[in-house]
Amino acid sequence: MADSQPDTDTGAPVKGPMSYLSGSLTSGGFCAVAVVITLKLIAYYSAHPPHYSQRLAQSIATALKTLIIGSGCVATFSFGLVSAGLMLLFLKSIFQNESKSAA
């Protein structure tokens, strides 16, 4: 692999800019999927609110709905944050490589 030359100090492979870019794009794709799923869940639960005659059943249904929508929002945020971080790391490694080759 051309992207992972071993580090002389630790022997661990050093990741190159293309691995950061591919990771960022992959995470961004997962973020887009999570956004779509979360918006569809919100639309579904808005159109079909739970109606139960017993108070305990209503409480459990509302808690489950909140948990499902919250999990979708957490997934969206997590994938978006990872994508943004890897994109910044990609840009940093590109500019570091340009400054090293200019010197």
Image: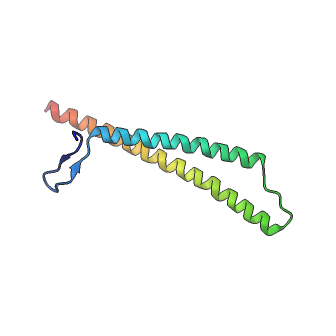
**Residue at x 83%, y 61% (from the top left corner):** 52
Which quadrant of the figure contains the C terminus? top left
State the residue lying farthest toward the front. Answer: 1
50 vs 3, left or right, is right
Q: Nearer the viewer, residue 24 or 91?
A: 24
State the residue lying farthest toward the right. Answer: 53
How is the model colour-coded?
rainbow
* Percent coordinates x, y for residue 50 in the rendering: 79, 56
Q: Nearer the viewer, residue 18 or 101?
A: 18
**Residue at x 69%, y 56% (from the top left corner):** 65
> Is 22 drawn above or below residue 76 in the view shown?
above
State the residue lying farthest toward the bottom. Answer: 56
> Is 70 drawn above or below residue 57 in the view shown?
above
* Percent coordinates x, y for residue 64 in the rendering: 68, 60
**Residue at x 64%, y 43% (from the top left corner):** 39
* Percent coordinates x, y for residue 46 in the rendering: 75, 47
Q: Quarter of the image holding residue 66?
A: bottom right
Which quadrant of the figure contains the N terminus? top left
* Percent coordinates x, y for residue 89 in the rendering: 33, 43
35 vs 61, left or right, is left
**Residue at x 73%, y 65% (from the top left corner):** 60
Q: How many marks?
A: 0
Q: Quarter of the image holding residue 96?
A: top left
